[in-house]
Amino acid sequence: MTTPPPGAEPPKAHPGAPGPGTALGSHYSRCFGCGADHPTGLHINAVTPDGDTVEAEFTVGEAHQGAPRLAHGGVLAAAMDEVIGMSVWLFHKPYVTGRLETDYLLPVPVGTTLHLRAWCNGIAGRKAYLEAEGRIGASDGPVAVRAAALFIEVDMAHFAEHGDLAAIAAEHQDYEVNP
């Protein structure tokens, strides 16, 4: 379900997408994954090094542990979901997670910095097929976590209908939201 079907198109960044070397901002200030205003969030800041992939770092803190001194698996899955979600920003279309498969390869101790990378393998209709990996200590360090995902393109009315229209309008003035 996270492998592109035959005939899926290769991803194409939107002409107005951030260029190589550009930092990607938070999509919502209170987002658990990337929001600067979330008190116990992951505070992930990402960059696109080449206009096709997204890279970020996440340091596991005390608030992110499951077993003593080890990252909670759900927090690692959230980090994968966030960096994958940031990679679809390159298409300038809103997407939501439809499916996320996560493989845990190594334990990740509190205090560890994970180097995250995400990319898109193909698009078929409204479905985007993506992958990510988290490496310990460096971008070429050992892989601790891998993820594959299916994201579904939606329109902004989805967020207005199911979320907070005022928050969307306050932080996304470049989108027209007419539920």
Image: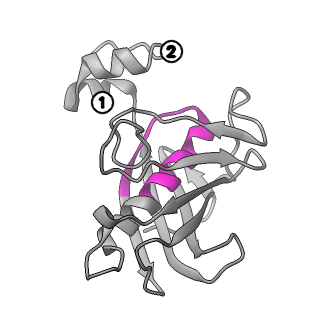
Judge by depth and name the residue closer to the eye, 41 or 17.
41
The mark nearer the N terminus, 1 or 2, is 1
Magenta-tinted stretch: 81-98
Q: Amino acid at mark 1?
A: Phe
Residue 132: x percent and y percent?
A: 56, 65
Give the Cα separation between the discs numbered 1 and 2. Answer: 15 Å
Q: Is residue 34 visible?
A: yes
- Which quarter shows the N terminus? bottom left
Judge by depth and name the residue closer to the eye, 146 or 56.
56
- Which quarter shows the C terminus? top left
Residue 92: x percent and y percent?
A: 58, 32
Residue located beneath label 1 in the image: 159
Q: Amino acid at mark 2?
A: Asp
Residue at (29% x, 62% y) in the render: 63
Vertical arrangement, residue 66 with respect to residue 44, above or below:
below
Residue at (45% x, 13% y) in the render: 173
- Image quarter for residue 171? top left
Residue located beneath label 2 in the image: 174
